[in-house]
Amino acid sequence: MISNLIKRKVFTLLKVQYSNMLEYRVEIALWAISGIIPFFMLNIWTSNNLNEGINFSNVMLSRYFLCAFFVRQFSVVWVVFSFEEDSLMGKISPYLIQPLNPFFRYFAQHIAEQITRFPFALIIAFFFFIFNPESIWIPNLGILFLSTISTFLSFLIQFLIQSIVACLCFWTEKASSIERLLFIPTLFLSGLLAPVISFPEYVKSWIYLTPFPYLIDFPANLLSGNPTNISRGFSMQILWIFLLFPLFKRIWTEGTKKYTAMGS
Amino acid sequence: MVKNIIDVKNLSKSFDISSKEAGLKGTIKHFFRRKTKSLKVIKDISFNIKEGEIVGFLGANGAGKTTILKMLCGLIYPTEGSIFVSGYLPYRRKEKFLKNITLIMGQKQQLIWDLPPIESFYLNASIYDLDNFEAKRRIKKLSEMLEIDDELYIPVRKLSLGQRMKSELLAALIHEPNILFLDEPTLGLDINAQRNLRKFLSKYNKETNATICLTSHYMKDITSLCKRVICIHNGSISYDGKLDLLLKKLSPVKEILIVCRSEKDAVQLENAGFIVKSKTKNEITLTVENNFITSALRTILNNFDIEDLYINEPPVDEIIGKILIKKNYDI
Amino acid sequence: MKIRKYLKVYAKFLHTSLASEFEYKTNILIDLITAIFSLIGSIFLLSIFFQNNSTIGGWEFEQALIIQAIYTILNGITNTWFNPNLTEIVKHVREGTLDFVLLKPIDSQFFISLKKIAPSGFLEIMLGFCLLIYCAIINQINLNLIFLTLCLITIICSICILYSLWFFISTTTIWFVKTWNATEVLRSFLYIGRFPLNSFSFSLRIFFSVFIPVAFITTIPSEVFLGHYQLWKILLEVMVAIIFLFNSRKFWLFALRFYSSASS
């Protein structure tokens, strides 16, 4: 019964947020375009034959970056900015009175936007294939399924990390600055700009202990059919979620206790 | 002869609004093609305002008061018709014109939030080409008029709403404009702050002969400040003239409150053929037209032995409230 | 006469902005750390590119560092002047206080562009300069007056182009209110400025010179710095800067006309 209630809440939230998203057509398109960095990176890699040293063929590299684009599109998180804005405008108070953790609202927002973005991402992939006909491939259903799961897990990890940072809004006004700081290792170490396999050895020795390579590199390699350690990948993703979720709950409870409204 | 400082002829304004059907299907349709329709918000209005007048724009929500005010400031372009303010076309926003006007909007502030108001004053002073000496003089004069002093040196975010309002006023008036536009200035203020604002505006008008145009929902603003009122209903002017004339014409009635000796008397009065506004136990309020006051009083005093009697004007709010819902009336 | 007034007003802007900003000192520290990490990350990425190649697009590693330095300086300028004002205009449009700006007897573009300043960006500018000086040493650059003048001219042009791009985004708030999306798109494209223009394939080189002159902004000043400049390129950059500035103003005036016809 309780799960039904939750399901209904989630469904209604999704429906409302989806309507919201459709209002902002241009914004969604822009958002999809802003994920374009992987393609530029690919261009640098292939134009200068940088992949010769790492045993990655041009085709593998193209597919990797295309998949990195997709994974990024469907795992990008901006909850800290929404939360900070809402807390500055004093919207958090009414949310706190409702019997629903406001982060569910943001979660629904993100999923809704990803659904809206899907057609735009497909269009971009289509253009990609036109320019790189030799990289065209269709992954088999099993791989598609597994990579969808791993992308979702990557999304969860990033959502949890950002939500934890967002809760810092209860203590400081500059949570978004902290997020911008944390974004840097995500940008460089997740495989968005270069596949982890190309990193020097001294980095590869510790990077697999951090959550970063599992954010883009693992799902992208999985989807593109490049060699990757599937069991390690999934187990690390799940491990990080198990570590982050209780941390989030804890900091959320502490934060709401300390809450002071910051509106007019 | 006092010139017209504001001259409006056949002014109209239309907006394009996008419309959407409700529900998910409507939202998806809306995603692919937006329907827009043209909405005429201001319909062919004309009026003149002389220098030194305080004019109130009265009307229900959405009637168009704020749109008219913003057109007078030059923030919105008219669709048809002509506007002249101080001889300028407001929407050209010439520098000389801008130095002569000011806009004050209720619950919207231009002061810098983290700094004391005094910093914002000097910033405004430099924007309006005032040197430091002149700025200081004006700040002193206005702060005396507004009765604020030490608050000017405390960051805005730490001030109370009333203090903030006074500081906003000072910031808006530092360049001594000739024409003041106020859009719902008392919105969100407590009774004291409202009273202070009205007192100040009245004083400012007397001392500087500044023209004041204000829009408000609060009747007290209009009745205590404006001798002249322009009523806007659905984008057209339904009345433009003296306020007391309007009140008189709209409500040629008085209320008679009678305190009877017993409840039986009150019930009898109730059934005596008068219009009864309200009755509680042995008190009864009758509404009587001005022409019939004398005869009504005679009837009551002749036939009833009453304890006390009061004759009142009906509350102004009620009268003006009638204006807001009445469609049109012959004045 | 007019110029004195505008200078005086700008001095007041500086004063009020700095006075506000110093209320939030931690921000400055976080932003500095972010700038340092970002630079480290980009150099790390660059080293990955160079690990098996000695030149990319005709640039050696030590030379590519110059581009990083100039990018850091320009990024610092963006964070000092352009970003805070973008946040301000979003606030104005959202709270309805843009009207106050339009009613002041001062040019609205001047007011909107320069009202705020974020001192934390200064540190990033200095960081870039330090790196630039280091590059001058390791590349054995000969500093003379002509050289410095040309460098200054190209950097000023780069700043103008950058300003026009940011101001373009600021202007779109009049329609969209929320600008994270457009800002993210710009940031993504600007990131390309960290790499030499010639490291991209031919078609992208055209794209990044003509349509979104990002690589233009950093590569040309870097070439001048190295002494490999060609006069026609410098003139081209000056022309592009003028065109962009002119169009940014036209677009702003267009947006104001729209605001004045369509808002209520």
Image (spheres, coloured by chain):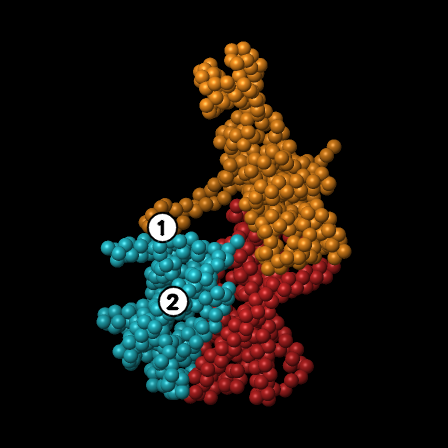
Q: Label 1: state its secondary structure.
A: helix
Q: What is the letter of the cyan chain?
A: A
Nearer the observer: mark 2 or 1; the answer is 2
Which quadrant does the C terminus of chain B fall into?
top right
- Along the horizontal axis of the image, is B218 left or right of A226? right
Q: Amino acid at mark 1?
A: Thr
Badge 2: few (under 14), some or many (20 or more) residues near its Cα, within 10 Å? few
For badge 2, the amino acid type reads Arg
Q: Nearer the viewer, residue C54 or B56?
A: B56
Same subunit, tags 2 and 1: no
**Is residue B97 visible to us here?**
no
Give the percent coordinates (x, y) of residue A93: 44, 55
Please give the name of the residue rendered at 25% of the width and 69% of the height, measured from the top-left corner: A145
Chain that appears orange: B
Q: Residue furthest right?
A: B133
- Can you identify the residue that label 1 sits on? B27
B274 or B142, which lies in front?
A: B274
Q: What SS does tag 2 mark?
A: helix
* Chain ID, red in image: C
| Left-right relation of B300 to A62 | right
- The residue where tag 2 is placed is A250
Residue B117 is situated, as x and y percent measured from the top left of the image, at: 64, 55
Q: Residues within 10 Å of mark 1 (few under 14, many from 20)?
A: some
Q: Taking B289 as reference, is B108 above or below it?
A: below
Residue displayed at 35% across by 46% down = B22
